Amino acid sequence: MTRDSRLSLAEASAVAERLYHIRARAFDLPSERDQNVLLESESGERFVLKLANPAERREVLEAECAVMLHLEPTGLTPRLIRTVEGSAIGRHGSRFVRLISVLPGTTLGTARLHTDALRRDLGRAVGRLGRALTSFDHPAFHRDFHWDLANAERVIGTYLPLVADTALAQRLAAFAAYHRAHVVPMLPQFRRGVIHGDANDYNVLIDEARQSVTGILDFGDMVYSHIVNDVAIAMAYVALSADDPLAAAAAVVAGHHETRPLTEPELEALFSLMCMRLCMSACVAAKQTAERPGDDYLRISQGPLARTLPILAAIHPRFAHYTFRDACGLPPVPHAPRVTAWLAEQSARFAPLIGRDLRTTPVAAIDLSAGGPLVSSEPSENTPAELDRRIQRQLAERGATIGAGGYDEARLIYAWPDEPTGTEPRTIHIGLDLSLAPGSPLHAPLDGVVHGFENAAAHHDYGPVIVLRHRTEGPDAVEFYSLYGHLSVDSLEGLRVGQPIAKGAVFARVGSAPSNGDWWTHVHVQLVTDLLDVPCNVDGVVRASQRRVWKSLCPDPNLILGIRMEELPRQVPTSAIAAARHAHVGDNVRVSYGAHPLNIVRGYQQYLYDDAAHRFIDAYNNVAHVGHCHPRVVRAVSDQLAVLNTNTRYLQVQLTEYAEQLTALLPASLSVCYFTASGSEANELALRLARTRTGARDVIVMDSAYHGHTTTLIDISPYKHAGPGGEGAPDWVHRSPLPDVYRAGGAHADPGSWFASRVGEVIGDLAAKGRRLSAYIAETCPSVGGQIMLPKGFLADVYARVRAAGGICIADEVQTGFGRLGTHFWAFEAHDVTPDIVVLGKPIANGYPMGAVITTRAIADSFDNGMEFFSTFGGSTAACVAGRMTLQVTLDEELQRHALLVGERLLSGLKPLMGEFEIVGDVRGSGLFLGVELVRDRHTLEPAPDEATFVVDRMRQRGVLVGTDGPYHNVIKIRGPMPLSLGDADQVVDTLARALRELPGPR
Ligand SMILES: Cc1ncc(COP(=O)(O)O)c(C=O)c1O
């Protein structure tokens, strides 16, 4: 429609009143061919007034009306409203007018969150619409229409010369050539019918919160065509907005197949069809830009197109076909089951690859998975020589000369330099590795011919590699391949493509570093059902998200090797671990991330790795204080465990030296240590010390506090006893308000003294009841309370009041000690107080079970009342060594200063989020103890726990682990090991901001 034929909004309102008796305000809607106007009636009803393009034939509009009436029962399409005279089509001068209802939802194109669940539902919706359309036809839709995907070739051919960008034009031509050669010949066998023809992301309405489709709009492109085109078009637009276009398209296919099964030729053609839709879009845009330079509507998809087309061009169409089959629950490679069945049937007849029968030769399992101890977390320790040494030791221990393993194994030894950052790394090894002596001869397991060979000499490639081609027997014989990598250089000498290799013949030898790709000494054996047109160097390591497809492309090589299953590394699927956990562990020992728990197999520095060898920034766990598995701590503890690990009943220098070092970092009065095996045990002991010292029993605690899991500690932990399953506080526990300045103290000029006087009131009440105070216990920065920073002056004021009432002041520094706040080594130092008892735990020994209570000589002496104190594991030799080394590393690596630096970087990224997102109510904390509080309303401070959980979940999906906390579970807590780097900090902030941007609903 040309600009000057468009109606003004006032004219549109007048048309609505005249034809439909609807008084409404009018708003412009973006549209291409028709003019669409949104009407909002006085009663709040919403409609779209559609003013047809003057060039539109009445017959076409009648057909559209008929289809809308036909599809109304699906609930997916708008209702057609008749004029006051009862016509489906009204007139305004020479223009045809229709009025339709507005469906609920927002357009897919404007949605912030696109999950695979939504994409799958889109596939379902398109399938439902298609099913309803099978019983519909109209002569007007039997037309030659330029947007009809069946005309893709012609449209692209016509407009390609108008594409100014030559690289883009070449790409479009390549897609079109593939389509012409491979898909066009198949088209005659495709099912045909009336299709919607334009399920683009602005014609699809969704419920963003539920991630489901609520409607499909716009019947202006309906046409009698191949019915598969509807899903192809939906896939094309979904791919445009996705990080992984193929996976996104596959989710649409999966949903569609559920409601309307696709045929095999349709599945095969889908990828090319969806690419053609995007190519058509690029070509038509080029044409329209040439006609109407400066028209923004036409450019909408050109940016994403430019990004997506190269990604799609890099995908082999057969790989896409296999991916779509997998999404439909079919074997990805159609002929793979035939190959594997034949191999299984023939297994007894294959010649042994190594010349000796692997069924009877002792083989040792070599586990190089992400969680396997043969691999070091430190890449420099995985040199070929180191790996060979470790593997040889394992073989010697098991009495074997051959090692085997690695098929479908997630490894972290691959850090491919060519991997684009931000994409999923390739970690899944899909060959089977046999560790053999260098030069060992390899015999062809079955007859074949040389299909390809090369010296893939790049570092960490295959080195010399040979691919043999084979053929199954029988009437439906198919070809398949076996690949052998990391061979000796002379294996390739004299070889020629097409050369027959007889079963049992020696055709290659095992290579060694550096000429074998610079790996440990082994041969990589891989079966391949489709080489995807790669002559030889097919991938041996692939992405975990494409695992099923690759396992069909590359079935288990043991089918031709015959190693006994029990001699291969054992893999326990995550689902089996979850089931066993449910069977044997109490369900309230909670696992994070609900339905998608993480199976963590390795930790190193500030990172954790899951069973797919994917890396996560651990911005959550403060126990691994100096970094997960810090080599100095690991070595010190394992060395000690190999010599002695016993209890405190003997004199041991490890304990005394540690006690001296720890107390040297504390105020002089805190000079006596007791060691325990946990923070809970330490808090229990602290309470006993206070009670023996004062002869009193009552305790004052903070609201929302948590001090441990034992019976007594649940009693003093409102977070537990006042929460689900809690039985409330016993009479000896007295609660004081949580000094949360953001939520409760903002109105007071001096929140510190205001909150302290609330504690004073509790002390007063207690005295009034004739009860005596034994202790005031508080975390110096309440953590489960929501990463709270106590107001200035509060603690000093409270301690003075408590002491005046005869009580002992206990500082629970289990979360905050050892430099975490950056500004001070202990959090209480920031408040100019000296507690009577300090309780330490969590980070104290970098994960080795440990807690400590440190107090004054006087309190310790009164505790020494005749009853022995003994904790079997508390203060054991190895625990003291772990604590000592953790402390030493903290000091040597200046981690307190580092935490301050990284904390400031985090805060400088997090604070601006309060300006960008209304939901970010507060950002607080110090060093690596930070909280981001989410609220639905900045005035009422209504907590946003669901949103916080959503954000935490999305961050995990992008490789960052954080948690939620606070009485309302709406505070995102960022802690993590102290070595968290500046780069990690930036990634945490970016990932958090990205997740906030994806939050459904008004911002
Ligand atoms: C402040 C505080 N105190 C004590 C404990 C109890 O420590 P543990 O779990 O080692 O028994 C915790 C544990 O989360 C804690 O956060």
Image (spheres, helix red, strand yellow):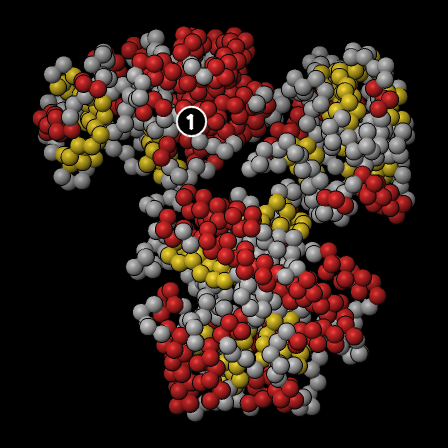
Q: Is residue 659 left or right of residue 81?
A: right
Residue 633 position, x and y percent, is 72, 60
Question: Residue at position x 46%, y 38% from top?
Answer: 115
Residue, disc 1:
303
Mark 1 residue's CB less than 8 Å from ligand 1: no
Front-lying residue, 65 or 345: 65
In the image, residue 416 above or below residue 194: below
Residue 284 in which image quadrant: top left
In the image, residue 107 above or below residue 944: above
Residue 963 position, x and y percent, is 51, 55
Question: Residue at position x 56%, y 47% from top?
Answer: 983
Q: Is residue 806 left or right of residue 870?
A: left
Question: Residue at position x 33%, y 9% from top?
Answer: 143
How packed is label 1: few (under 14 Cα within 10 Å), some, or many (20 or more)? few
- Amino acid residing under circle 1: Gly
Residue 4 position, x and y percent, is 18, 18
Element marked by disc 1: helix
Question: Residue at position x 72%, y 20% from top?
Answer: 536
Quadrant of the image containing the N terminus: top left
Front-lying residue, 180 or 879: 879
In the image, residue 666 above or below residue 176: below
Residue 428 in which image quadrant: top right
Front-lying residue, 407 or 494: 494
Q: Is residue 931 left or right of residue 689?
A: left
Residue 247 position, x and y percent, is 52, 31
The answer, for residue 566, to whether it is visible in the render is: no
Q: Is residue 655 left or right of residue 292?
A: right
Count all numbered tags in the image, as a single digit. 1
Residue 555 in which image quadrant: top right
